[in-house]
Image (cartoon, rainbow, N blue to C red):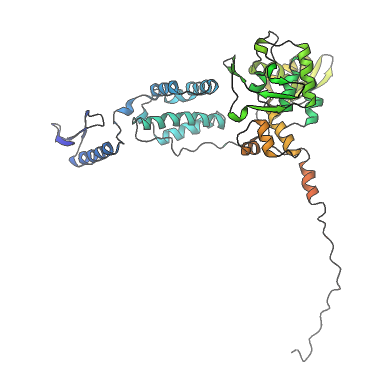
Amino acid sequence: MGHIVPTPAGGYRANWRDAAGRQRAKTFPTKREAKAYLAEVESAVSRGLYVDPHAGRMRFGAYAARWLNARNDEITTAARDASIMRNHVLARWGTTPMAKIDHLAVQQWVTELGDRLSPATVAECYRLTSAVLRTAVRDRLIGHNPCEGVRLTRRRRKDTDDQVITQQELITQLLPAVPQRYRALVGLAGGTGLRWGECAGLRWDALDLAAGTVRVVRVAVEVSGHVTDKAYPKSRAGRRIVPLPGFVIDLLTEHQRRYPPGAAGLVFTSRSGAAVRRTTFRAKVWRPSLVRAGLLGKIVEVGPRKVMAHWHDGEGRECSQQFPAREAMEHLVKYAHGGLRFHDLRHSYATWLVSAGVPINDVSAVMGHEQTSTTLDRYTHPSQHRDQRVKAVFADFLLTPAPEQEPETEQEPTDEDS
């Protein structure tokens, strides 16, 4: 049981034993404060909620390192979290004792981050910070999580989010603009809705061109420019069989004839025979193809070897500048804002299926979603002919003019009425 003793300086020292039986003490200016604190401590110890007042001296960075090392996340998730922790979270809280982090300080930090980072990145910074402090609460290092109740910047959807192209644009504009070596890769993504990792990790043994199907059983994972193979897809529902449209079968057949299988039987490889890297593909193949297809900026010839480039910057402003032909392409690839993302082919695929009347549970199955709500919420968008179809519902609802009636004549009051 705890007890209180006076100190030579005129204060009062509260003495108690913690949950491990170690002797603890804290000095207060008055006996009343010492008694109140001792009562709280003894109550916390008896209920198993005791927090050592000195434990919060541990610095956030040291505890966060232990927290990261103890997790068993996927390699891509671990790499992403480590990068955000290193570049944003530890830069602010690394040397701060955890007991010194309060709610207002976290709220101010989140607000300041919102001025220079996207809402999605701010949310990730907050998520990691809160997770570390929440674990510290469980370990009885601090009494509460100061991240609770912090308000984040709301993410506003932009016109460039989750874009959709039509099947006609895919076939007649985008695919012809893609280099031959990667045309089947883009066609596969557009015609099956496969994710990037599922396309990049695809092997010939998972394809049955005669039956027109592809089995999704493994994915490629890229971390720090290094591509590795993962022997299972994103989720249990991700292991699936997807039908191949005719144009995709044609593209894959031609691809098989032109390019021999890569290492371990990979369908798609770089010129060196290695696995395709997403970062390199985006810069060297995908965005240049969008420019050539007229889906990212615009290039107009104005003279011999001279062109005028038009594009929109990050603020949505329209920009124009004259370049030599080759430099115009490089400039648009680097500076033009927006443009279709490779993942938008997946959004387009789901939208085409739903618009064609394919049942949502079937769409969800070929997409590899465990919940149909995911398909509806994230991967379907207004179709090209939406307005016409909505109007067609009301095509027979025509107003029939009411028969004209002669206006009633107002009669003069008589003496009997008065």
Q: Residue at x 65, y 13 (%)?
A: 275
Which residue shows up at 75% across the image and 31% down it? 165
Side (left or right) of 311 relative to 73? right
Query: From what the image shows, is residue 392 above or below residue 377?
Result: below
Side (left or right) of 346 relative to 96: right
Q: Does residue 160 appear anywhere in the picture? A: no
In percent of width and height, residue 332 lies at: 72, 21
**Which quarter of the image is occupied by the C terminus?**
bottom right
Left or right of residue 380, residue 300 in this image: right
The image quadrant of residue 282 is top right
Q: Is residue 394 above or below residue 143?
A: below
**Residue 244 figure quarter:** top right
Measured along the vertical axis of the image, is residue 21 above or below residue 33? above
Asked if residue 356 shows in the view, the reply is yes
292 relative position to 265: left or right: right
- Locate residue 371, reporting x and y percent: 61, 37
382 vs 25, nearest the viewer: 382
In the displayed orientation, state which residue is furthest to the top. Answer: 272
Q: Answer with the quarter of the image where residue 367 lies.
A: top right
Could you tell me residue 350's position as x and y percent?
70, 34
Q: List x then y, in percent, for residue 119.
A: 56, 32
Quadrant housing the N terminus: top left
- Farthest-out residue, bottom: 416
